[in-house]
Image: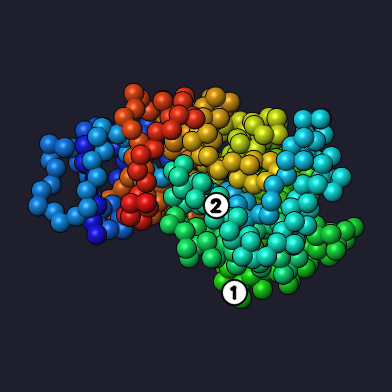
Amino acid sequence: MSLLVKNIGCIVGIDESGRLCVAGDAMKSIGTLSDAWLLTDGTRIKDYGPMSQLPTGIDCESIDAEGGWLFPSFCDSHTHIVYAGSREREFLDKINGLSYEEIAANGGGILNSADRLHDTSEDGLYRQAMERIDEIVAMGTGLVEIKSGYGLTLEDELKILRVIRRIRESAPLEVRATFLGAHAVGRAFKGRQSDYVDHVCNDMIPAVAAEGLADYVDVFCDRGFFTPEETAQIIERGAAYGLRAKIHANELAVSGGVEVGVKYGALSVDHLESMGDEQIEALKGSNTIPTMLPGCAFFLGISYPPARKMIDAGLAVALASDYNPGTAPSGNMRFVTSLASIKMKMTPAEALNAATLNSACAMGESKDYGSITRGKIANFYITRPLPSLAFMPYAHQTPIIKNIVLKGKLQ
């Protein structure tokens, strides 16, 4: 059934330009309409306009926003939501001064999560993950990418991806799946990294593709993990099976991940805490979206990506949560936009553009998601009345969401 939202104080995120992303100086602007209404056709946005032109005689469900604001749902293009248990022991290790790399060298980090996941049933993983899905939906996310990568064996990587498929079939938000077998070297291949890369290419990717379990392929291309050459080998193999690339790059060091991502047409290169002018230059003119994960920098206490330099260079930057048990245990995209403003000096409009339209573009999904546009999927949330757009990142923990609509359905 159609849904009519009336008495909207302000619709934010309107974009009828047809663009797939917004870049550079244009990120400072965001389309708005005050004192408005919006109508869906049951799934997609049908129309909107000022209250002075409110349509009448429509047989539909109705919501009175009572002056609240309407925003496009967040699009979170980088998460690791399917995992077993938590890693607060490592949180204490960080407090006591150990680095991410030292924790990993001591058997923690990704391998710790892989051990826990191996001992958890598919049903158990699904139940845990759905709790996190419910959490992010309640905080305004309507499109999410979920990675594997805590399996590191063929059987466990497939288990994670099957859980993601179950989430995709049952959750109200839209879900995309990424195969990240190259998150670390599995324990069985310790000291044999090249053999593990061959295993990912020759055994894992064909098996994932045979079941149609993934949309994208990802590689952790960074110091101490996988090299640019190994990354290229894996994403070329993925491309042969129809999987588009999304790359972990430059979290721990300038790794070559940005350059290999651009060379092979990756949808996005993500993290980017370590970025130089050469990497920014490499991204110019490409269709690869630089995606920043400030929740990770916040949690690890490392440097934040140079957002201002990238935007000032004309790039279309995106924001995502990196929701995972070790380095960013939160999927709160509103907090991500707040960190973007506080720590990376992005304006509220820039941060919202980065967390909606541009993050949808980092999944190749901005034709249907990421803005208030006639014909796009009706994913949005309604807040209580706000004093300004800046209130969103400013008062990032104040509860403001009153209603959530996903695929045209009131949740």
Residue placed most toward the observer, 167 or 241:
167
Q: How many neighbours does mark 1 have within 10 angstroms: few (below 14), some (14-19), or many (20 or more)? A: few
Which residue lies at the image location 62% right of the left edge and 51% below the top edge?
80
Residue at the outermost left position:
57
> Is residue 206 placed above or below 388 in the rendered structure?
below
Residue at the outermost bottom position:
210
Q: Nearer the viewer, mark 1 or mark 2?
A: 2
Q: Which residue is mark 1?
A: 211
Q: How many neighbours does mark 2 have within 10 angstroms: few (below 14), some (14-19), or many (20 or more)? A: few
Is there any visible trace of residue 253 in the rendered image?
A: no
Q: Which residue is mark 2?
A: 131
Is there any visible trace of residue 35 in the rendered image?
A: yes
Indicate left or right for 255 with 247 as reference. Answer: right
Residue type marked 1: Glu
Q: Quadrant of residue 330?
A: top right
Residue type marked 2: Glu
- Asked which secondary structure carries label 2, the reply is helix
Q: Badges 1 and 2: C-beta atoms under 8 Å apart?
A: no
The x, y position of residue 143, in whole percent, is: 46, 52
Which residue lies at the image location 48% right of the left edge and 29% below the top edge?
396
Q: How many marks?
A: 2
Which residue lies at the image location 66% right of the left edge and 68% below the top edge?
158
> Is residue 245 placed above or below 297 in the rendered structure?
below
Q: Quadrant of residue 202?
A: bottom right
The x, y position of residue 36, in whole percent, is: 22, 37
The N terminus, quarter of image: bottom left
Q: In the image, which disc is placed on residue 105?
A: none
Residue placed most toward the observer, 37 or 15:
37
> Is residue 78 placed above or below 390 in the rendered structure?
below
